[in-house]
Image (tube, rainbow, N blue to C red):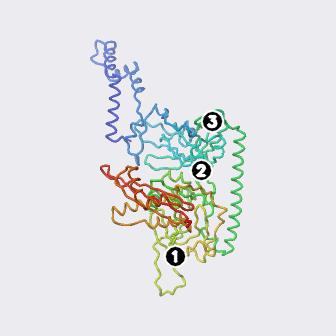
Amino acid sequence: MSLPPEKASELKQLIHQQLSKMDVHGRIREILAETIREELAPDQQQLSTDDLIKALRRRGIIDDVMKELNFVTDSVDQELPSSPKQPVCFTDKQSTLLKKTNIDPTRRYLYLQVLGGKAFLEHLQEPEPLPGQVCSTFTLCLHFRNQRFRSKPVPCACEPDFHDGFLLEVHRESLGDGTRMADSTTMLSISDPIHMVLIKTDIFGETTLVASYFLEWRSVLGSENGVTNLTVELMGVGTESKVAVGILNIKLEMYPALNQTLSQEVVNTQLALERQKTAEKERLFLVYAKQWWREYLQIRPSHSSRLVKIFAQDENGINRPVCSYVKPLRAGRLLDTPRQAARFVNVLGYERAPVIGGGGKQEQWCTLLAFLCRNKGDCEDHANLLCSLLLGYGLEAFVCVGTKAKGVPHAWVMTCGTDGTITFWESLTGHRYIHKSTNPDESPVAEQPKPLYPYRTIGCVFNHQMFLGNCQPSDSVEICIFDLNDESKWKPMSEEAIKSDLGLTTVWEDQLSYLLSPALASYEFERTTSISAGNEEFQDAIRRAVPDGHTFKGFPIHFVYRNARRAFATCLRSPFCEEIICCRGDQVRLAVRVRVFTYPESACAVWIMFACKYRSVL
């Protein structure tokens, strides 16, 4: 496959500069003159081209040139478009030199190095890519707590040349521990694994999930000098989850070095206790789920044919409760509104789980990292991600499992408004539908609203804290009543069995600040288009975030400059803003959110919103 003309020209220029720097032309002239004097017989008029090339090769000049010509990948990659074109594979002798970075001496870090791979037997016959040749690549993605990393793409091979280092910050998130350097005992209590996902990208830009692995890193706490080397065997995904795909060599190191290391016995005991506790929790939930299912079938035997999904297999073939696939997810500054989040999920690619041979659909619900790294997934993956994002915006969101036309299984998202409005969100298209229940007892003469949504039946709904099975006489979406508090219509699971730990709140409430983002985006949209849109979700989220008996106050203000001191001084001159900042009451929580909208010529529109919620003591 040839390079684009502009890249070919750039490559020629680089080669020419290197040859000039080595004075290759002068050396060739000297060798040719010497060869002519020594080897040209009196009866010969000239030497052939083959004779001249042999003379150059014999004196080693060709080998010298090839040794000196190195193409640094970084300088070329900067010019290449990011997607969908593939990086051109060049030999890079300096790729093993890891870049230096500054670290905070008051924080504790785990330095994870990937020192190559081996035994990727599927690529045993893979030829080594030539300079300038586009080839399939491996990319390793990592996730640890709230940190994500991605390695440089390396050509697919039996022994892929991974040489990357990742600096993972390790700290406690508990109140008061945020700035304290974590010691060995503290880190031993951090049970979050490092999630590693290996992605293959072919020459056409299509991505494939190769492996997903959860690395237990705490063995380094009991190793000498805080350094340990691991050999990680990666297994396949889906139907190949029992087949090894390759091995990675991993080196773990603590920075700064630990003053006191734990004994390996202590570390092993802690890990064994955690595994035992996890296994017991899974066993108890399985026992409870079986009992719940028996009770559900006793209500009506026909329930056995409904799509009530309690467990689902992940990419590693492990059965997990469906509630574990959803958790409130905040997109930071990347997505302003719930509708923008729906659009983001919609543009991620749709692909059914691959299956070898014929037969039905292969079930595979991907973990969040695997779905995002691959940039495509099944309808369940899209629905789980959209539900997580909508929960992050403070909406009461659920994943719905049911069927579309012709009985095709499907998953979508539902939000329940504080006024009882039920909204369906189709994660594959970004469309929203308002559900209006049809009364089957109405006279046929009465005009019934025709549903616009494509859904036919619904078996269950769930999020990170709740699971409810539809126990109404009919599972038709059209006549379904979505009063989730009515146990005669929706059979709930015990929240104690599925609930997760909730975080602590502080005086400045981060979650409340995040909920202000959609309002700021809506204000600027209204200034730009004179159309007000998207405020319904914001108002609903605020109603849910403010408990009964509490009061919410918000103060938005607009600036056309970015000087924070000047803007804050202006805000304080407003009695409304001062009232919020100086608010007194019980359980006062303050929030602030800033959004900068950029325009040409350094122009900008800055929106700031101060807010508080409190319980009045008057």
Residue 289: image location, x then y, percent: 68, 64
Give amino acid for label 2. Leu
Q: Nearer the viewer, mark 1 or mark 2?
A: 2
Q: Are marks 1 and 3 in contact (CB under 8 Å)?
A: no
| Quadrant of the snapshot with the N terminus | top left
Identify the residue position indicated by label 1 in the image: 478
Find numbered disc 1 in the image and state the secondary structure of the residue it sits on: helix
Identify the residue position indicated by label 3 in the image: 258
Query: Going 42% across and 61% down the picture, which residue do you hit?
Result: 575
Q: Nearer the viewer, residue 426 or 499?
A: 499
Q: Nearer the viewer, residue 307 or 236?
A: 307
| Quadrant of the snapshot with the C terminus | bottom right
Identify the residue position indicated by label 2 in the image: 175
Tell me if 1 is positioned left or right of 235 in this view.
left
Give amino acid for label 3. Leu
Residue 97: image location, x then y, percent: 49, 32
Instruction: State the CA–CA distance, disc 2 to disc 3.
Output: 23 Å
Q: Nearer the viewer, mark 1 or mark 3?
A: 3
